[in-house]
Image (cartoon, rainbow, N blue to C red):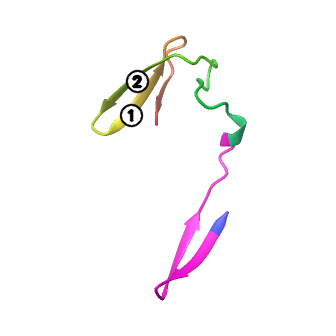
Amino acid sequence: MLVIYNMLGAWYFKCFLDLGLDNKISGRCDNCGNTSFKSSVKDFIFLRECRQCGMKKII
């Protein structure tokens, strides 16, 4: 979806992509559906690792 708006005489364009995120169940692993994670933060990067399958994801 593309949104165009005028703010203080300048035109701004924002593009929102439909990534299909509404099909995912929030708070669960994308791979196995588990809810237990090992989380860590390093250099302002939040890394989440599933405790069951080991899949890592940057949030």
Q: Is residue 13 left or right of residue 19?
A: left
Q: Do the residues bearing badges 2 and 1 touch, measured as CB atoms within 8 Å?
A: yes
Expressed as whole percent of the image width and height from the top left, the position of residue 11 reads 52, 81
The reply, left or right, for residue 42 in relation to residue 18 is left
Q: Position of residue 7 (x, y in %)?
A: 50, 81
* Residue occupying the point 35% across, 26% down: 40
Q: In the image, which disc is placed on residue 46?
A: 1
Q: CA distance from mark 2 to mark 1?
A: 7 Å
Label located before the other in sequence (2 or 1):
2
State which region is magenta: 3-21
Amino acid type of the residue that numbered disc 2 sits on in the rendered structure: Ser
Compared to 19, does 14 lie above or below?
A: below
Say the numbered circle drawn on residue 39.
Answer: 2
> Left or right: 45 with respect to 52?
left
Query: Residue at (60%, 24%) from the top-left corner?
Result: 28
Residue 58 percent location from the top left of the image:
45, 34
Residue 29, above or below 52: below
Residue drawn at (27%, 37%) of the image: 43
Dot 1 amino acid type: Phe
Q: Residue furthest left?
A: 43
Look at the image and say whether residue 11 sits in the magenta stretch.
yes
Q: Is residue 49 magenta?
A: no
